[in-house]
Amino acid sequence: MTIRVLVVDDDTLIRTGLRLILDMQPDLDVVGEAGDGAAAVTQVRVLHPDVVLMDVQMPRMDGLQATAEITGEAGAPRVIILTTFELDEYVFQALRSGASGFLLKRTPAEELVAAIRTVAGGEALLAPSVTRRLIEAFAAQPVPHHPDQALLGELTARELEIWRHIARGLSNAEIAEALFLSTLTVKTHVTNLLTKLRLRDRTQAVVLAYESGLVTPGALETPSGS
């Protein structure tokens, strides 16, 4: 399957560089570029990409507002925020706006490509070296809303257990090993809990886990071998 990608950045050189990297991959197709958030929203509606690489600071409409508008529509693509700083304050708002993850602009090409494939498949939270620190810092920020407790009450004990592991950054394989389950069983539980919580992906599940109090800052555990 070919993954359709939209590249959004106000720097022409960065857009050109990203296109060159992605066009070398047989399963990635850069379907368009945009130089600001407003153009990105329009391009998404016209081109229907699977993944959007989104810069933050841009003229007319920044990447945060664009991400919120894009992810708020039906059939929305996954959005990966491209940021310059490891703990850029904009990332916190971006995650709440519906972004599926983030990457540093200095990320190696092979990691960028892998991240796009991962997010397109909805399989795992992006985990560059700063992810756990970022999530913990994000969780310490003021909570903008209270989760729907009725939705949380629909989860089974096993789904809650798996949700805690997701919030700590574990992959399906790592969760399966920790709970002595098959990877397929874990994947089924993950799909069920995302459906019950009305979430699009694992990143949103991590955010909600902190906002609901299921996991608290400082409680992160590093998976063995990471």
Image (cartoon, rainbow, N blue to C red):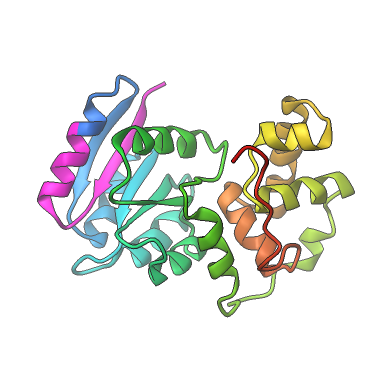
**Along the viewing direction, whichever of 78 and 178 lies nearer the viewer:** 178
Outermost bottom residue: 142
**119 lies above or below 215:** above
Q: Which residues are magenta?
A: 1-20
**217 lies above or below 42:** below
Rendered-image quadrant of the C terminus: top right
Residue occupying the point 69% across, 39% down: 191
Outermost right residue: 157
Residue occupying the point 17% across, 55% down: 35
Residue occupying the point 84% across, 54% down: 154
Q: Position of residue 78 (x, y in %)?
A: 44, 45
Q: Position of residue 218 (x, y in %)?
A: 67, 67
Left or right, 30 with reference to 153: left
Left or right, 3 with reference to 138: left
Residue occupying the point 58% across, 55% down: 204
Residue 75 in magenta?
no
- Quick check: can you spot residue 196? no
Left or right, 78 with reference to 202: left
